[in-house]
């Protein structure tokens, strides 16, 4: 049975079977040295014709970089002067006894060995399966796996239930454009991909689940930046019978333990994390995402900051209207509840909202939620919704609140952004296995793509010609 390259260091003198990709090969007379790559490490394999059977000698002539091969051979210790201290397997090599080529590779469109000679992003994404062979990219994916695994175990150990919520739901105004999904069975009606599981997780609190979390996909049809994608992953958390302080302490401890266990070389600028009100952050740093690192050239410094007491509403000058600064389900600071009755005081109302900032990036945000139906209804009114619109868009939630809703609150952390910062990468595209380009295209699958007229007819849809 195949073993991994890294396991060979414990099997000196044993015959082993290996398989992987040819990273590079070097010929010294009739002898060929291969750097064999699998997920665990590189390993030197030595091919000596006199040690191989006839079939293997013929296969040896066809070897090319990035071809996939299998080798059976004997693990032997390398001489003291031949040890490679830069490789985990640098103290051993395998003398091949047989060789098989599973599949030959064409010359890749960019170098796999030398990542410094990087291809442009379009080419990297078109051949993402090759890009992921780079050591840096592989390590980013492994780091992401370790972080997700740690998060899951942390919440399991704190008595949370991991519960999945739907991917197709109802279109509701949550701050960004929805991706719409036409319904074949109900022509003219549409589902929407969720911008977040916000309403579902609140309904889980009404259901009595008390502690929920999920590693969940979210979808927003919005303009892109380096730290955003049309589809992204977040850690979603909701709890009943909690205060803001309970949530901040739970999440702060999560990140402290995560860093200590997975990235112990990192150091905290401040522990416990710095806390600033929104007003303090804006007055002192001119941003609600301040970067408080002492040395911004130090890639291992982590400056976590809690920002609290955000405005409940913000005036959207482009639309000439007031909107929710976070989302309409955010609870009002009890001291400001009376101001809900005066639309002229909307700019003065504070929310029980909090963001977690890391090195100048907002990595998490949440709030205590409004659990009083009359208060939530008033917020919708102030946001310009009529009673008919409120019932059409949020009636299901207001109906649920009639059957006993606990005080509750939660938070969502942008997992892609968390991994990006911890991996010292400039874009979340570097820590997502198959991301889109900045304008939401997928060069690998060539999407978005056309569909047939039959598909449109089945959905009861037709396309308008766009006049440029």
Image (spheres, helix red, strand yellow):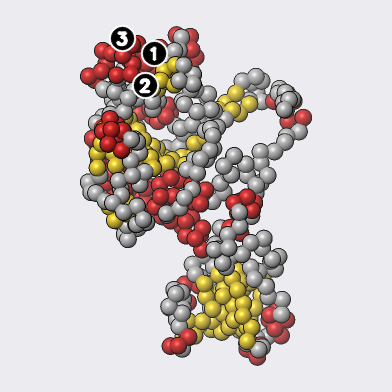
Determine whether, in the image, residue 49 is placed left or right of residue 88: right
Q: Which residue is mark 2?
A: 313
Could you say which quadrant of the image residue 263 lies in? bottom left
Which mark is drawn over residue 261? none
Outermost residue, bottom direction?
A: 50
Q: Quadrant of the C terminus?
A: top right
Whichever of labels 2 and 3 marks the residue nearer the N terminus, that label is 2
Whichever of labels 2 and 1 marks the residue nearer the N terminus, that label is 2
Q: Which residue is mark 3?
A: 341
Q: Which residue is mark 1?
A: 382
Tell which of 452 and 281 is nearer to you.
Answer: 281
Tell which of 310 and 451 is nearer to you.
Answer: 310
Q: Secondary structure at mark 3?
A: helix
259 in relation to 178, above or below = below
18 in relation to 257, above or below = below
Q: Does the rendering let one see residue 244?
A: yes
Residue at image position (56%, 75%) is 35
Q: Residues within 10 Å of mark 3 (few under 14, many from 20)?
A: few
Q: Secondary structure at mark 2?
A: strand
Whichever of labels 1 and 3 marks the residue nearer the N terminus, that label is 3
**Would you say the residues marked 2 and 1 are in contact, meaning their CB atoms lie under 8 Å apart?**
yes
Question: Disc 2 versus disc 1: distance between alpha carbons?
Answer: 10 Å
Tell which of 125 and 410 is nearer to you.
Answer: 125
């Amino acid at each position: 049975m195949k073993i991994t390259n890294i396991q060979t260091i414990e099997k000196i003198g044993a015959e082993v079977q290996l398989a992987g990709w040819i990273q590079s090969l070097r010929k010294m007379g009739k002898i060929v040295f291969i750097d064999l790559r699998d997920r665990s490490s590189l390993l030197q394999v030595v091919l000596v014709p006199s040690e191989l059977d006839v079939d293997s000698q013929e296969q040896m002539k066809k070897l090319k970089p990035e071809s996939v091969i299998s080798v059976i051979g004997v693990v032997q210790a390398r001489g003291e002067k031949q040890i490679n201290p830069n490789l985990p397997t640098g103290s051993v090599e395998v003398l091949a006894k047989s060789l098989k080529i599973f599949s030959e590779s064409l010359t890749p469109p960019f170098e796999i060995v030398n990542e410094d000679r990087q291809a442009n992003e379009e080419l990297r994404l078109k051949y993402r399966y090759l890009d992921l062979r780079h050591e840096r990219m592989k390590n980013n994916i492994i780091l992401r796996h370790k972080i997700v695994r740690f998060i899951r175990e942390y919440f399991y150990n704190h008595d949370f239930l991991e519960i999945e919520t739907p991917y197709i739901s109802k279109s509701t105004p949550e701050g960004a454009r929805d991706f719409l999904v036409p319904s074949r069975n109900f022509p003219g009606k549409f589902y929407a991909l969720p911008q977040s599981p916000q309403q579902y997780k609140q309904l889980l609190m009404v259901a009595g689940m008390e502690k929920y979390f999920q590693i969940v996909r979210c979808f927003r049809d919005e303009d892109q930046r380096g730290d955003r994608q049309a589809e992204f992953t977040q850690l979603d958390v909701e709890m009943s019978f909690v205060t803001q302080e309970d949530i901040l302490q739970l999440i702060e401890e999560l990140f402290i333990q995560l860093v200590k266990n997975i990235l112990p070389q990192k150091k905290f600028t401040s522990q416990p994390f710095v806390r600033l009100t929104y007003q303090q952050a804006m007055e002192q740093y001119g941003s609600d995402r301040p970067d408080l690192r002492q040395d911004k050239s130090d890639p291992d410094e982590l400056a976590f900051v809690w920002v609290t007491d955000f405005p409940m509403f913000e005036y959207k000058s482009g639309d000439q209207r007031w909107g929710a600064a976070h989302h309409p389900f955010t609870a009002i600071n009890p001291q400001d509840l009376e101001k809900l009755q005066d639309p002229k005081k909307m700019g003065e109302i504070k929310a029980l909202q909090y963001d977690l900032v890391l090195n100048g990036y907002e990595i998490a945000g949440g709030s205590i939620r409004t659990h009083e139906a009359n208060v939530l209804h008033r917020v919708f009114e102030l946001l310009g919704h009529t009673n008919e619109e409120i019932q059409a868009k949020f009636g299901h939630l207001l109906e649920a609140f009639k059957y006993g809703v606990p005080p509750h609150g939660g938070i969502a952390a942008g997992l892609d952004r968390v991994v990006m910062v911890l991996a010292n990468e400039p874009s979340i595209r570097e820590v997502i296995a198959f991301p889109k380009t900045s304008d939401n295209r997928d060069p690998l699958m060539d999407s978005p793509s056309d569909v047939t007229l039959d598909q449109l007819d089945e959905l009861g849809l037709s396309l308008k010609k766009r006049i440029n």
